[in-house]
Amino acid sequence: MATKNHNLSDYDITKVPSGEGMKVGIVVSEWNENITGALLAGALNTLKLNGVKEEDIKVMTVPGSFELIYGASQMVKTGVDGVIAIGCVIRGDTPHDRYICQGTTQGLSQLNATQDVPVIYGLITTLDMQQAEDRAGGKMGNKGDECAVTVIKMIDFKRRIG
Ligand code: DLZ
């Protein structure tokens, strides 16, 4: 469970398989770009730190988090071994944000369960901008780092399971 002021993105680098030879697609939402840009930077940094080569990473942007579903569904067809979907939905004055979160979460879940490559959930859903900043390189870590470690582990899982 998430706890206050704890870096949620800490990981043991010795437990992460080498990412060498892995091809990773990243789909990034342009909404709340200050946050999604920081998440992307974290993901890229951690992928490279764990052996994924720059030329094996494909980054595409989509307008908003809701478009991550279509973006990820197209990205999986490009020959990548795994996809990270990055977005940030911040609570607004109407319930609109909740529909975006639900729709995006369901869409990405469905893709993850039905496609041949793993789709990693890099959507942060927060009550305000401060909470988003805390999770995009702030005191709670960087969700992008966590997604990078997760995609490497899931690609490795697929390779091991055969
Ligand atoms: C419309 C909208 C709103 C209100 N808020 C966000 C948000 O906080 N984060 C985000 O990624 N996207 C938001 N969007 C845009 C939708 O995701 C989507 O792009 C539009 O509804 C068009 O399909």
Image: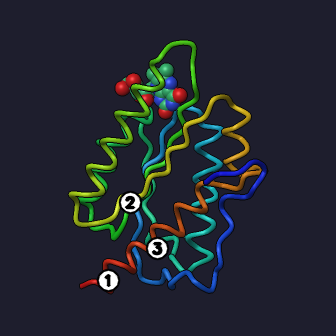
Question: Pointer 3: what residue?
Answer: 152
Helix, strand or loop under label 1: helix
Question: Pointer 1: what residue?
Answer: 159
User: Mark 2 packing: few (<14 Cα in 10 Å), some, or many (20+)?
Assistant: many
- 155 is higher (above) or lower (below) than 116: below
Q: Position of residue 150 (x, y in %)?
A: 49, 67
Q: Amino acid at mark 2?
A: Val
User: Mark 1 packing: few (<14 Cα in 10 Å), some, or many (20+)?
Assistant: few
Q: Position of residue 37 (x, y in %)?
A: 61, 46
Helix, strand or loop under label 2: strand
Numbered disc in front, either 2 or 1: 1
Question: Pointer 2: what residue?
Answer: 83
Q: Amino acid at mark 3?
A: Ile
Q: Position of residue 86 (x, y in %)?
A: 49, 48
- 102 is higher (above) or lower (below) than 150: above
Q: Is residue 69 left or right of residue 151?
A: left
Residue at position x 41%, y 66% in the image: 24
Do the numbered discs 3 and 1 sit on residues whose CB atoms are within 8 Å? Answer: no
Residue at position x 44%, y 44% in the image: 61
- In the picture, the quarter occupied by the C terminus is bottom left
The answer for how far apart the CA atoms under marks 2 and 1 are is 15 Å
Residue at position x 26%, y 49% in the image: 110
The residue most toward the front is 1
The answer for how far apart the CA atoms under marks 3 and 1 are is 11 Å
The residue most toward the top is 94
- Give the mark nearer the N terminus: 2 vs 1: 2
Residue at position x 50%, y 42% in the image: 87
